[in-house]
Image (cartoon, helix red, strand yellow):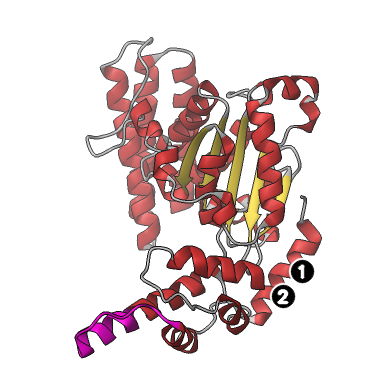
Amino acid sequence: MTEQEWSGKGRGYLNAAQSRERAGDQQGASDLFSQAAECYESASVAAPREIDKNHWHNQAESCRAFSRSFLTQSANTPIRPGPAKTLEIHDEYIQGFIVSEEQSQLTLDEVGGMEAGKQLIRRIQHRLTDSGSSQRHPLASVKGILLFGPPGCGKTLFASALVREVGATFFQVSAADLLSKWYGESVQIIRRLFEVATQTEPSVIFLDEVDSLLPPRSQIQHEESTRIVNQFLTELDGFRAKISDKRVVFISATNKLPDEMDPALMRPGRTDRILFVDLPDSIARASIFKVILKVEDVALDIDYAKLANLTEGYSGADIRAICGRASELALDAEESQGKEFSINNAFLERGVSETPRSVSDELRQTYTAAAEKWART
């Protein structure tokens, strides 16, 4: 039999095992998970590519772990499958995503640019903390927000600054936090994340690199990835977490274009607002320089307006690199001349000259065109 035939047979046993599990038949589920493991192991042997061999082997190991777990648990005991190295989904793990106000070093006012995003967040903050307004006008609630734009423009930084603004429980999660190579665990983590978020409302879930977790299903080759996307969309719809009755907001960020995301995620109701995070303008660039350099010993006569003019087309990450280079130059001068140096205009201007832009004009135009098509503010 071929890889596809073995994996298809394994999928059949897996579906049957899950049906037995839902019916409370522990022994039957265990037997079927074991048979699914054998099929997936055979698919691993038959697969020509090493990446697929590893994938099917991991599926087999996870099914074996599920099978073993049923033999030692009663029908009323929550199942935490997997070998010793497998993550168990305890609330302590989910609580590790929570970011406190003390951990946030920025406020929205210190984030350069992104005025539309700031206005939207402040409206959401009012609605999250004023339950009366949400009850009077439930259709006005915003449940899903997508931030997209070129790399290094402050999407993640913006999210970090939200912690002090929203007055809600803030969960900051990356795609890597939710992905596991063991079958079924990513779905468990996602389900529990939304459950805990609704229990601690008002709350905000921020997911960075959402494209890594939720790619278009037309491009997905493996069953587990499809289950992850489906589970996440189900949670966004509120079929389990009942988001529609709770003050929970989901914010995601990506460097991809909206056209490259799963269409089901992009529809209103799941993603109500789509914000383009563009390269900073002149005023924002000056502000970014000030925020980054506030931890440094700088000269009193820094010409922030000139620096902003010199860095047209630079991202926030580019400006941080410029400041880092200027700091290195000041330190080099101290070591070579044996006296203290503050960061001055000369060091910063040299940093600009030695730091190329990371976002080309062509790439920015691509994002700008997508913003005209997709923006919902």
Q: Is residue 99 visible?
A: no
Residue 57 on image: x %, y %: 33, 47
Label 2: element kind:
helix
Which of the 4 quarters of the picture holds residue 343?
Answer: bottom left
Foreground pick, 206 / 289: 289
- Looking at numbered disc 2 in the image, what kind of residue is underneath it? Gln
Residue placed farthest to the front in the image?
Answer: 300
Foreground pick, 159 / 327: 327
Residue 28 on image: x %, y %: 39, 18
Rendered position, 366 above or below 68: below
Which of the 4 quarters of the picture holds residue 375?
Answer: bottom right
Q: Gap between marks 2 and 1, in whole Å?
A: 6 Å
Q: Give the magenta-colored segment's residue range.
A: 328-344
Asked if labels 1 and 2 touch by Cβ distance under 8 angstroms, the answer is yes
Disc marking residue 369 = 1
Residue 176 on image: x %, y %: 42, 49
- Looking at numbered disc 1 in the image, what kind of residue is underneath it? Ala
331 magenta-colored: yes
Residue wearing tag 2? 365
Number of marks in picture? 2
Label 1: element kind:
helix
Q: Is residue 113 left or right of residue 75?
A: right
82 magenta-colored: no
Foreground pick, 174 / 165: 165
